Image: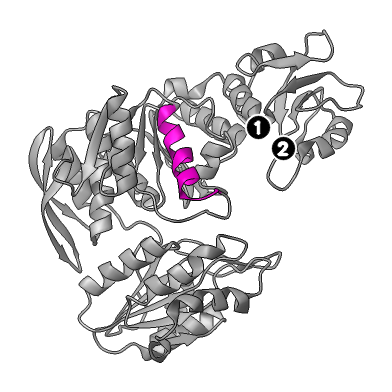
Amino acid sequence: MTKQTEKAVSELLASAPYTALDEVEVVVSGIAYASNKVQPGDLFFCVVGTANDGHIYASDAVSRGAKALVVERPLELAIPQFVVADSRSALAYASAVFFDDPTSKLDVIGITGTNGKTTTSYLLEWVLRSAGRVTGLLGTVEWRVADTTRKALHTTPESFDLQELFAEMVESDVDTVVMEVSSHAIDLNRIAGTDFKIVAFTNLTQDHLDYHHGMEDYYNVKESLFLGSDASCVICIDDDYGKRLFDRLRDEGRTVLSTGFSAQADVRASRVTYSASGTELSLVSPQGPCDMHLSLVGRFNVENALLACGIALQLGIPLSDIAKAFATAPQVPGRLERMNAKKSHDFSVLVDYAHTPDAVEKAIEVVKSVTQGRTLCVFGCGGDRDRTKRPLMGRAALTADYVVVTSDNPRSEDPDTIIDDILVGMEGAEDRLAVIPDRRIAIRHALLNAKVGDSVLIAGKGHEDYQIVGSEILPFDDRLVAAEELDAL
């Protein structure tokens, strides 16, 4: 934790209406929302989550030295208590105050949407670093503070951890932060208290319906990021949700820039040529036209690049500098990442994070466009997540020539039950699919069946280096496994 001075609870809760059960001024030296992390002198927030209620752990927090509690209901504990309507929201605002409002000293760019957040973030962060900015990166793959990286625990950290990371960035002379903003983070108020300079939207397709109550609810949560901020907005308008959001913001007089393939987009591609080695495109923008080379392939990656370009333009980066950076952008981990083995093979192997029907279909479409032979796809679906998308995933995977259905992260569910749900969407295609629950054996099967000129796409886990089976987190990295199996062929 970065060094902080003591703060009065009344100051920390200034943005969260509260009722003090004891009329005393309480000064605390820290904040905690997990009782096992409480230090003497901390203010403990009893956060009500989807699975646990922090009020249950209040007595443990007190025994560890908590000086006061923030609660949603009074507890029978002899300690100062401050009652708020929403302890999670109060935690977010209090954390921002505790760390002296770090985002007021940073240019924070928030990128949300179903697919493309990670690739857009990596492209944009590369452009900004190439332009001389000192950057921070927060997303699904990793958290980066200047030149220091660590593995990401969530796409968007819990509010206290987020504000602590922002404070660390300020101390490390970071000036610009690129962060992915998940719908869960928006709905659970993790980003409350964060001052965004720009917010951007990629697209919206079916995902997380185990959490959201349908697509309309999912969209409304995403939209609230834009309506709840006075930041400039950059919106990809290539899908109906993007168009809807753009129109809403424009009608409200907001500063909004549109991107995409649409002829109405402010930043758009007028000509695109795809190849296995990358993409050539002619771009139209408010700064004029520009020819660009991308090391990435596929239409959806062009959409991601156009969005990153729009954000960079809003930050004042010259178009020529953006083009130079795009030409040298490195591969994004687990996003159509091409696998190399010690021995050469006459077919290609790619690993991608695609785990929604739309993302799977688009990833296969890209691979097919640069493959002379067949496209083989290995994929599964996660357990304890939206069951309704499983048959849709199966149907989307059938755009490949041959499919191996396997296990992903089954969590507490029976892998065979998950596979049965997937196969509902694959009826009639039994002659070009195999069912192999063991993911390593499934990958091996696909590689053994690949012929000259074919491509094997291993989808669903991307950069992840684990598999969740029951309550165990087991080591499993599609990239490592694919390389090992390639070398064993």
The answer to whether residue 358 is seen in the rendering is yes
Q: Is residue 185 magenta?
A: no
Task: Name the secondary structure under disc 1.
Answer: helix
The location of residue 419, given as percent across then percent down, is 55, 77
The location of residue 477, given as percent across then percent down, is 51, 69
In the picture, the quarter occupied by the C terminus is bottom left
At 78% from the left and 41% from the top, the residue drawn is: 36
At 28% from the left and 41% from the top, the residue drawn is: 243
Label 1 sits on residue: 88
Above or below 347: residue 303: above
The answer to whether residue 6 is seen in the rendering is no
Of the residues shown, which amino acid type is indicated by label 1?
Arg
Identify which residue, 130 or 166, lies in the foreground: 166
Q: Quadrant of residue 228?
A: top left
In the picture, the quarter occupied by the N terminus is top right
Tags 1 and 2 in contact by the CB under 8 Å rule?
A: yes
Identify which residue, 377 or 25, lies in the foreground: 377
What numbered label is drawn on residue 48?
2
Q: Quadrant of residue 185?
A: top right
Give, as a single range, the part of the protein colored magenta. 212-227
- Per the picture, the main secondary structure of the magenta-coloured stretch is helix
